[in-house]
Amino acid sequence: MRSPAPGQLVEGFRQSGQIDPDGAIMRAFLGQALAHPELLRAVWHPLGFIHILIGSVDELRARLHIWTRNSLMRASTNWPIHDHIWTLHSRVLAGTIENRIYDVQDDLRSASHRVYHVAHRAEDAILEPSDQLVQCTLASSTTYRAGEQYAVPSLRFHSSKVELEIEPVVGTCVLAGDSRCGIPRLLGPIEVVGDKLDVRVACDSDEAAQACDLLLSRMSV
């Protein structure tokens, strides 16, 4: 979907370090998405949210993440702790999200997890077990609400948790680097497991539009 949103989001971020502070850019994008849902590039993310690509500008990609009760049921993995090969900047558009940061240290004696590498292919991703055993402990946990922004440094293990018992939707606008150096990692069981992640399962345009409509109705900033 052709939209001025990617350029506006990136330009504003480079000038102020903020992602759409008054929500005007994302409201306009969501309105355009509702008018032309067939043009949305939406997929089901294996961690239980709808991933919509807003667009790219130079090294930055703008993305929309929407959690709904239905999307959580579509999660295809229960291994939530992972890292990124770029710094993630996220602004909460609606609802609340808990960002958990972990301290991960090599540990052969009392390991809690094995490190798995995420090897992306054309249609899916393979979880490749490594020889690295680690002890993972929670270092911090912070809850962010609509209008607040946070960042996760590259190569720092984290997980996200949302609560949809009261609010029916959580939405975030994410700016992420487009770097392809390094290999994303995920923490899984110590016993070696080989698995496939469905990372490019298309989300039906009508369902993506319903999620966008719900998010737009709940945006307070």
Image: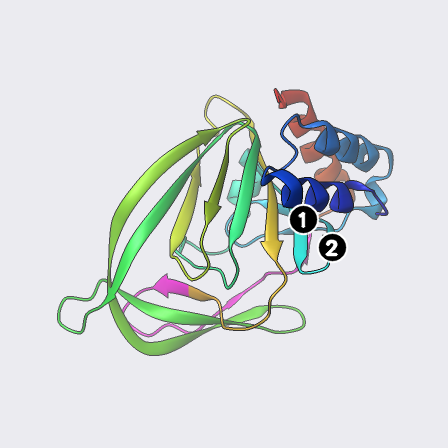
Q: Name which of mark 1 and mark 2 comes first in the sequence.
A: 2
Q: Between 212 and 3, which is closer to the camera in this rendering? A: 3
Bounds of the magenta span?
186-202
Q: How is the image coloured?
A: rainbow
Most distant residue in the front direction: 15
Q: Determine whether, in the image, residue 19 is placed left or right of residue 97.
A: right
Marks 1/2: CA distance?
A: 8 Å
Residue 213 coordinates in the image, percent (x, y):
72, 28
Q: Quadrant of residue 71?
A: top right
Determine which of the numbered discs, if any, sits on residue 111 in the image: none
| Amino acid type indicated by mark 1 | Ala
Residue at 71% across, 39% down: 207
Q: Nearer the viewer, mark 1 or mark 2?
A: 2
Q: Circle 1 is placed at which residue position?
A: 62
Asked if marks 1 and 2 touch (Cβ < 8 Å), the reply is: yes
Most distant residue in the bottom direction: 131
Residue at 52% across, 23% down: 167
| Amino acid type indicated by mark 2 | Val
Determine which of the numbered discs, if any, sits on residue 57 in the image: 2
Is residue 191 within the magenta segment? yes
Q: Determine whether, in the image, residue 38 is placed left or right of residue 219.
A: right
Circle 2 packing at 10 Å, graded few (<14), some (14-19), many (20+), is some
Residue at 78% across, 31% down: 28
- The local secondary structure at tag 1 comes to strand
- The local secondary structure at tag 2 comes to strand
